Image: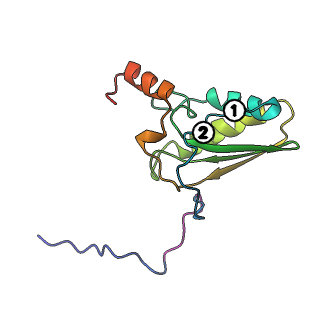
């Protein structure tokens, strides 16, 4: 039985509107945890720790989905990824993150950037996250 699907990418295909295709940093410094931050930036990290993955009771920070946070004046910029590009919870997570960060005192605007480089892997999960995943019943 032969397949009629051409595995070559379509040169006329359009990029996904949700995805930022700019090259990211290498995996040095990941997982990002907010350790050592202060003030409003610390509050933003605390808010992110309160957002859990919709499929497992684990913080998105401990899961390694947050690659970075910067706060300038009243604006928070967050770089994040997902465990895979087809994640069905993408919009729900973006909404929950936006709501959590927007509730931080001193934050008036939230810029949430979805990035794919470096690619998420189990190595991005913090030690606390790995413990939480084991308690949830996953073998890692």
Q: Is the residue under label 2 in contact with that under label 1 (CB below 8 Å)? A: no
Using a 10 Å C-alpha cutoff, classify the residue at mark 2 as few (fewer than 14 neighbours), some (14 to 19) or many (20 or more). Answer: many
Where 115 sits versus 10, above or below? above
Which of the image's four quarters has the C terminus? top left
Residue depicted at x 39% and y 21%:
136
Where 56 sits versus 32, above or below? above
Observer able to see residue 76: yes
Residue 32: which numbered mark, if any?
A: 2
Kindly identify which residue carries mark 1. Answer: 45
Name the N-terminal-most of marks 1 and 2. 2
Query: How far across and how far down the image is residue 71, in percent?
Result: 79, 43
**Direction from residue 35 to residue 104 in the image, left or right:** right
Where 25 sits versus 68, above or below? below
Which of the image's four quarters has the N terminus? bottom left
> What range of the chain is rendered magenta?
13-18
Observer able to see residue 57: no
Query: How far across and how far down the image is residue 5, in percent?
Result: 27, 72
Residue depicted at x 55% and y 48%:
28
Query: Which is closer to the viewer, label 1 or label 2?
Result: 2
Residue depicted at x 49% and y 80%:
12
**Direction from residue 40 to residue 6 in the image, left or right:** left
Which residue, as the protein is rendered here, is positioned at the far top?
A: 135
Query: How far across and how far down the image is residue 35, in percent?
Result: 66, 31
Residue 52 falls inside the magenta stretch? no
| Structural distance between the alpha carbons of marks 1 and 2 | 10 Å
Q: Main secondary structure of the magenta part?
A: loop
């Amino acid at each position: 039985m032969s397949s009629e699907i051409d595995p070559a990418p379509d040169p006329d295909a359009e990029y996904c509107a949700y995805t930022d295709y700019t090259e990211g940093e290498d995996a040095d410094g990941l997982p990002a945890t907010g350790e050592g931050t202060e003030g409003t930036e610390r509050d933003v990290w605390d808010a992110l720790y309160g957002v859990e993955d919709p499929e497992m009771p684990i913080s998105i920070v401990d899961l390694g989905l947050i690659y970075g946070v910067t706060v300038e004046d009243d604006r928070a910029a967050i770089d994040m990824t997902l465990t895979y590009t087809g994640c069905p919870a993408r919009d729900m997570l973006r909404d929950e993150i936006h709501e959590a960060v927007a509730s931080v005192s001193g934050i008036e605007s939230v810029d949430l950037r979805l990035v794919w480089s470096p690619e998420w892997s189990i190595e991005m999960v913090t030690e606390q996250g790995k413990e939480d995943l084991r308690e949830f019943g996953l073998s890692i």
